[in-house]
Amino acid sequence: MFISRLSVFIVPVIGAFSGILLSAMAMATQTSDNRMLAKTGDIIQVRLDELHPTQIAVGKLQIAGDLDEYTRKPEKLFAELCKVQGAGKLKQQTKFSSPEDPSSYRCSLPAGTDKSAMNTVDIGPGGKIYLTDGHHAFNSFWEASGGDISLSVLVGQNLSRDATGNPVTQAQFEQKMAELKHFLPIDAKGNAITFAQLPSSLGLKLFQDDPWRSMLYYLRGISYDKSDNNLDPKTGQPYPEVPFLEFYWGQLLNSKMNLAQYSLSELDGYINALKDAAKIMTELSPEQRVGDSGKSAAELGKLDKIHKKKLKKLSEPDSKLAKALAYQRSHQQ
């Protein structure tokens, strides 16, 4: 699409923890056989090029924003790598290490300490690893440095065997993924797809661009919020997380808006689209079903009113949205 490789570096800090220390040695001995024994909540080491996507589209403007940030502040890539591995914050950096070397950067905590910050995978037939959360972050890592990055991920479910302990077929696995809604069966235009049509690996050139998904990234905290901040008034507890939540919101907005009416490559036009989308979302009944999620607007984090201060901040010339749009324009092929 529009991305060039970045040269970014970090050096270890004595007394801190390697961001991928869970562990580099374990990575060398980890096989598909022992991955098939992994349980929900286990942490495993993977390389980016081992991961199988479970969606065909991403919001490429969101990823452009990440890559712009990595270019401006190279330490941001490593800070994000620490975060998604549940390893806390990044420590001191210099120019002598690379993200491909798991021993060359350090985080404040051992990987896996904060599981709530980690991305999830499901284990499929033969120990194949299917990414069920984090397609945007992991694609940004891929575009920044390639598929040779190793990192820790959290096992969501091991679906490699059936209830009797027998290995499942690929067809059985795909059916189960669809039942669990761990596979998004639509493309960027809302057309139905099969599991076989999914990208073979990470890498933006293999993914479609879903403009709704990017818009929902920027609307987070403005017209809806994700589960940590989205409390069920009946229990006072967060609603359960919903895989592909933003895509379901995108389905609803696609039925009520025509993006061709907006100049989405320009900041003013994009802000106008966000304002209209936010109005639609916040005015929904809490009980309204959203897209194909089977969930209500309340369960998907609908806010009662637009957070105007956050929306105004996005409209500023130096906002993260403005920078993402500028980066995307300058890197389009």
Image (spheres, rainbow, N blue to C red):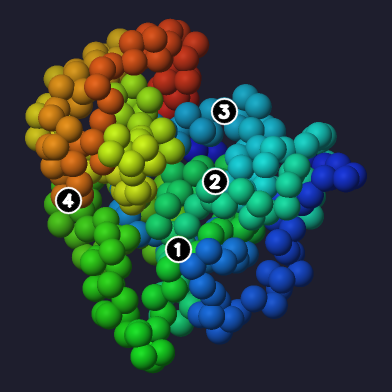
Q: Is residue 81 visible?
A: no
Q: Position of residue 270 (x, y in %)?
A: 29, 18
Q: Quadrant of residue 160?
A: bottom left
| Residue bearing mark 4 | 294
Q: Nearer the viewer, mark 3 or mark 4?
A: 4
Query: Which of the marked residues, 3 or 4, is nearer the chain's N terminus?
Result: 3
| Residue bearing mark 2 | 117
| Residue bearing mark 1 | 156
| Residue bearing mark 3 | 69
Label 3 to label 4, Cα distance in Å?
36 Å
- Label 4, secondary structure: give it: loop
CB-based contact (under 8 Å), mark 3 and mark 4: no
Label 3 to label 2, Cα distance in Å?
20 Å
10 with respect to 194 (left or right): right
Q: Position of residue 320 (x, y in %)?
A: 47, 20
Q: Say which amino acid is labelled 1.
A: Gly
Q: Residue furthest right?
A: 14
Query: Which of the marked residues, 3 or 2, is nearer the chain's N terminus?
Result: 3
Q: Quadrant of residue 278?
A: top left
Residue at the image point whose x is 47% and y is 29% from the top = 65
Compared to residue 257, the image places residue 156 above or below, namely below
21 with respect to 1 (left or right): right
Label 3 to label 1, Cα distance in Å?
29 Å
Label 1 to label 2, Cα distance in Å?
13 Å
In the image, 76 versus 325, the foreground residue is 76
Q: Quadrant of the N terminus?
A: top left
Residue at the image point whose x is 26% and y is 30% from the top = 302
Q: Nearer the viewer, mark 3 or mark 2?
A: 2
